[in-house]
């Protein structure tokens, strides 16, 4: 992971809130990487989320992304910095928002010419640790289930993108 100025060092270290999920996508690794790192398009597959690049070009280290998850004005802002960029296999981020904090990553593994496994992991620093540590045994699996739902939606999104690209014009 690359050091990026302005990110508290303690947030780059894994926190106790581990969340992970993976999905197999019937597409080549370059297509999956392009779809996963199309930050604004994440709104199409992450439920109730709007995403925008607020610094950088969105294509490498130094990119800063704001992802608001909620309905209307009720929700939370996830602010993250891209700190590692290894196309088409890996992106490392550090979340620095008020609620979502800590390192995360997308890792892509080719399983054939048109088959890629996307693994998404987060190692979050839980807010309000005294309370969070007690509820994480329930909240953690729920967060993992939500991540898995997002990745299944991602698979459908990539398949639809590929079908549209292959359609005659």
Image (cartoon, grey):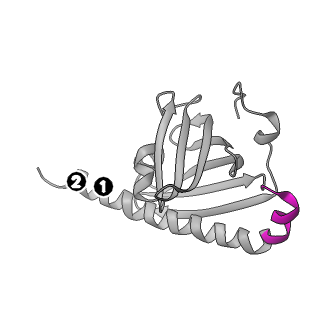
Q: Answer above or below: position of 94 versus 69.
A: above
Region of the chain picked out in magenta, as a range: 127-135
Q: Indicate which disc residue 122 carries.
A: none
- The crowd level at tag 2 (other Cα within 10 Å; few <14, some 14-19, many 20+) is few
Q: Main secondary structure of the magenta part?
A: helix
Q: Nearer the viewer, residue 84 or 150?
A: 150
Q: Is residue 163 magenta?
A: no
The location of residue 9, given as percent across then percent down, is: 80, 34
The location of residue 163, given as percent across then percent down, is: 26, 58
Q: Relative to 94, is 10 on the left or the right?
A: right
| Disc 2 and disc 1 in contact, CB within 8 angstroms | yes
**Residue at 58%, 48% in the rendered image:** 77
For the residues labelled 2 and 1, the Cα–Cα distance comes to 6 Å
Residue ID for mark 1 = 162
Q: Quadrant of the N terminus?
A: top right
Residue ID for mark 2 = 166
């Amino acid at each position: 992971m690359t050091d990026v100025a302005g990110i508290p060092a303690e947030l780059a270290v894994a926190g106790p809130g581990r969340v992970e999920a993976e999905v197999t996508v019937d597409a080549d690794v370059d297509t999956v990487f392009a779809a996963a790192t199309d930050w604004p398009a994440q709104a199409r597959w992450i439920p109730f989320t709007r995403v925008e690049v607020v610094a950088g070009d969105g294509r490498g280290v130094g990119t800063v992304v704001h992802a608001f998850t909620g309905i209307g004005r009720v929700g939370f802002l996830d602010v993250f910095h891209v700190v590692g960029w290894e196309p088409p296999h890996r992106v490392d981020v550090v979340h620095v928002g008020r609620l979502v904090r800590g390192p995360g990553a997308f890792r892509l593994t080719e399983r054939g010419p048109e088959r890629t496994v996307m693994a998404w992991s987060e190692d979050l620093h839980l807010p309000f640790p005294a309370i969070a540590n007690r509820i994480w045994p329930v909240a953690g699996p729920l967060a993992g289930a939500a991540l898995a739902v997002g990745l299944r939606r991602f698979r459908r999104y990539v398949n639809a993108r590929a079908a549209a690209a292959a359609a005659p014009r």
